[in-house]
Image (spheres, rainbow, N blue to C red):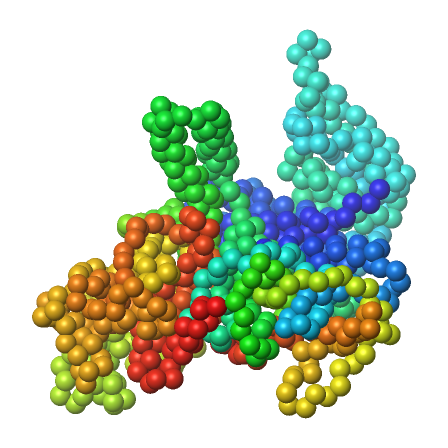
Amino acid sequence: MSTAQAVRMTNDAASPGGENFQVSANTEQYLTFILNGEEYGVDILRVQEIKGWDSATPIPNTPDYVRGVINLRGTIVPIIDLRARFGLERVPYGPTTVVIVLKVMHGNASRIMGIVVDAVSEVYNVSQQDLKPAPEFGGAVRVDFVKGLATVDQKMVIILAIDELLNSEAMSAANAE
Amino acid sequence: MTIDMSKFLDTFFEESAEGLDAMESGLLNMQDGAADDELVNTIFRAAHSIKGGSATFGLSEVAEFTHHMETLLDELRAGKRAVATELIDVLLESVDCLRALLAASKSGAATDPERARILSQRMGKMLGAAPGHVVQQQAPEGTVATAGGAAQGWRIVFRPHAHLYRTGNDPVRMLRELAELGDYTVACDTSRLPRFADAQPEDCALAWTVELRGDIAEKRVREVFDWVDGDCDLTVERLAATAASAHKSALPVVEQKAVEPDAKAKAPEQKTQSQDPRAASETSSIRVGIDKVDALINMVGELVITQSMLGQVGKDFDMSRVEKLMHGLAQLERNTRELQESVMRIRMMPINFAFQRFPRMVRDLSQKLNKKIDLRMSGEQTELDKTVMEKIGDPLVHLVRNSVDHGIEMPDTRRAAGKSETGIVTLNAFHQGGNIVIEIKDDGAGLPRDKIIAKARKQGLLGADEEPSDDKVFELIFMAGFSTADQVTDVSGRGVGMDVVRKNIKALGGTVEVKSESGKGSTFTIRLPLTLAILDGQLVSVGEQTYIVPLVSIVETLQMKREAISAIAGRAELYRLRDEYIPVLRLYDLFCIEPRQKELVGGLLVVVEGDGKRVGLFVDDLQNQQQVVIKSLESNFKRVPGVSGATILGDGTVALILDVGGVIDASRQATSPKGFGTKQAQVRAA
């Protein structure tokens, strides 16, 4: 409870602060990371910290992309393997493998979760106009996990909607009970 | 400069709630015996501070209502009125009404002005009907219309008590305020002034007589003195007053009548307020005794000393100082443990907070049911964690209500049974081991054993010729939808309840059991852990993982012998423990992890009990026992069946705490191959 409140407070404090950084009001900053050669971005204001991979305590009866929980300064934080979440082939964790700790909004509450990715990449400024909606991929990929596509230096960056991604039915189904 | 009053508003509500509780318990005590001065004063003070506070915050409805209560109480305090049941009834109802008014103001919801008005009227009537005031009453009634407006002026005799300055009040300010109301003359009475040599600069020895002329409502005059009420002798009388209205206590009647139309006029105003419902902030606070805080500070001091000592040892360490290091570490351990205990103690509150609502409840119920009931409470000072306390309230209410409604018989039945007419309900709390035990006992008829059996047979819970033990019969009342009450009353008997009671208590990690003797009464015993934040656990390891089994659920731990192991259909493994067969649960199977040992023979079996069932958990190894701090998995993740939470071990890793009941349930489902733990071991392989 208190953690959630504290987190919300930092966010509230962060939002106006973050805008100072931005070139214009329409521009948002995204932290990007590499997953299977592709570059993905998440809203930088949601990033709490980036840390190296350390072992996690597995939790029984959870989908295999839930790697377990870690101790983040006294808070129990679940870790999601994004490769497994996207059904990508599993690779051994290497020196660049990192955990990005994110704040995920779930209704009015917020949660702290970590995602395991291959490597972190850059921080980009992306304006709202440059954010193209994702086309229908067909059944292969769930579009609602993608907030939009941005082009930076001729490369495509997939901006993720982390609230939808990390609160998807597999995670929240058990939560409802 | 404006002060943001809303900051203090929450404090005011909190304090008012405490004040109301104090009033309620005071009134109940008063009913039992003579009104001793201290008691009346306590009630009066509570009412007074609520009035003062609500006026400050602009809660005029509350302030007005409380004022009427205060007037009534003031007469009581002055000994002008005897304690009568009727009076206490009205006052108790007023407490309820006030509580509703405050709750409404807090949430910004609409109030029920009608209820307050009716009560005010009743109080007004009582005031009017007071012996010795009958004559006076007539006059004000007749002059209602003029009382508020047409008085030509007031004579105010203001005689502050000596300590007035120390309460932070300045008579000059009040006189100035009076001056603003109208044309006035003031005379200072210096008769009380001591000789200069004896004068105390902080004492007030002056008194004033003010004659205020003009068309001024008495209320406005009195408002000036709101803050010094109780710290002074104040007389406000009409100039050229008739002899009739000379008495102070008669005046509120006048005022009240004048106020009533006001109250109605305020109602729409209240509604506009409710347009912006203030989000009632849910941050709760606790009051902590200063001794507890002091103890904490002492302990932190010691911790700092130990830390600096260890720092010294570590600075240039060599093997000769090992002993000193060990000594320091031992001290650190002791400090930490003590600190932990003290911190936990901060959350502890006497169970009185949960008990204090019962005298009122039992009183109301017994009146309603025409029973005579004496409620006795003991062990009110037994301390309990605040979270546990908040959650135990409802189950307790239910059990007490049951005792009153079903347990205690009607007076004539009791007389016929050779018992005293007055039934006794006893609430008792005490510590036992790491638990708190709460007993709810009545000397009523006891549980109707035959009725329960008959009902159970009807519902198919018992076989037709089964003769169950007492324990088993009484266990039945905790089943959902089981009620033996002949008649569903609005007090109890709907058959929802006992199962909910048990469920709630179980959710707190506690148990409830019942003992009953026909004709002599029944006793419900609730056992609860002292705190929800810390748990005594046994650390067990399975493969790489460490799990924590709550110590309370462990029956015993043993090394398995070959001859005691057997299996049904090659799958369900059983272990014979003395004359009992216990299912063996391979924890690694359940949690899908790679163990170090798969062979049962010689392996360790932790026999645990949950929900009245026993199973043996097969684990690799036992580690130490320790207290662990429970951390929630749900706050960032979700509920996981079989796991009640997590904790952080000494090395910083996370260990899961087993929920024994959940594990047992899960093991049942696990017989189907797709059940619990289908997660493959590959997850951790990478």
Please name the residue shown 58% across and 47% down the image: B46
Q: Nearer the viewer, residue B558 or B202?
A: B558
> Taking the image as drawn, is residue A158 in sight?
yes
Please name the residue shown 71% across and 65% down the image: A32
Above or below for B648 versus B449: above
B144 vs B604, left or right, is right
Count of marks placed on residues:
0
B59 vs A28, left or right, is left
B434 vs B90, left or right, is left
Please name the residue shown 72% across and 52% down the image: B6
- Name which quarter of the figure residue B232 lies in: top right
Residue B289 rendering spot, x and y as whole percentages: 49, 39
Residue B264 rendering spot, x and y as whole percentages: 75, 66
Q: Nearer the viewer, residue B368 or B573?
A: B573
Q: Nearer the viewer, residue B36 or B526?
A: B526
> Taking the image as drawn, is residue B90 in sight?
no
Above or below for B412 versus B286: below
Q: Nearer the viewer, residue A149 or B273?
A: A149
Please name the residue shown 57% across and 79% down the image: A87
Quarter holding the N terminus of chain B? top right
Residue B256 rendering spot, x and y as whole percentages: 70, 56
Residue B433 rendering spot, x and y as whole percentages: 28, 50
- Farthest residue, direction top: B197
